Image (tube, rainbow, N blue to C red):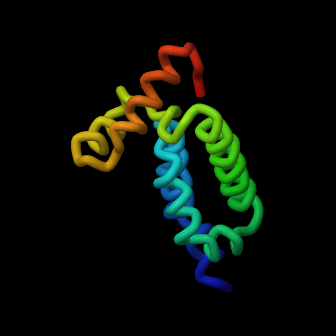
Amino acid sequence: MSEARTLSATPLFKDFITILGNLLSCGLLDTVGRAIDWHRDWFDALKHPESERASDLRDQLATMREVEEKHGTGCLLDLDHPTVVKMIKWGRVSDEMIENAKQFKIAGQSK
């Protein structure tokens, strides 16, 4: 049995996918994208039903990246989300991303 399959059978898989889903929901697309890239072999080795959740996450990320391509990087950031607030405080979110998020919200756009 591969290490990827062993990991997916544990609560670790659900926790990891849940964490990535939460990061995605607050608009931290680059963080989620990097995590998927860093663990690509693990994601690719998943079996059903874990593979379905991972695929859904990838699809959601792709859709959200299309929105960012149109409206600017960071436009989907939830600036009120505690994680985003911390990332801003730590200097991990650029002024441009913050401005794109504000403009996207002003324009009445939503995730």
Frontmost residue, 10 versus 56: 56
Left or right for 87, reference 21: left
Rendered-image quadrant of the N terminus: bottom right
Give the image location of residue 108, x and y in percent. 56, 14
User: Residue 77 location, x and y as percent?
Assistant: 46, 34
Please report the residue visible at 59 percent of the width from the left and 19 percent of the height from the top.
109
Compared across the picture, whether 59 is left or right of 14 comes to right
Q: Judge by depth and name the residue closer to the eye, 17 or 100.
A: 100
How many numbered callouts?
Answer: 0
Quadrant into which the C terminus falls: top right
Residue drawn 50% across and 58% down? 16
Single out the residue that lies furthest toward the left: 89
Q: Is residue 3 left or right of residue 84?
A: right
Q: Considering only vertical position in the picture, is 9 above or below 23?
A: below
Identify the residue at the far bottom of this view.
Answer: 1
Above or below: residue 9 compared with residue 107: below
Give percent across and percent down for residue 64. Answer: 63, 40
For residue 45, which quarter of the picture? bottom right
Residue located at (46% from left, 31% from top) = 100
Indicate the position of residue 32 as horizontal and vertical percent values.
52, 54
26 displayed left or right of 98: right
User: At 59% from the left edge and 82% from the top edge, which residue is drawn?
Assistant: 3
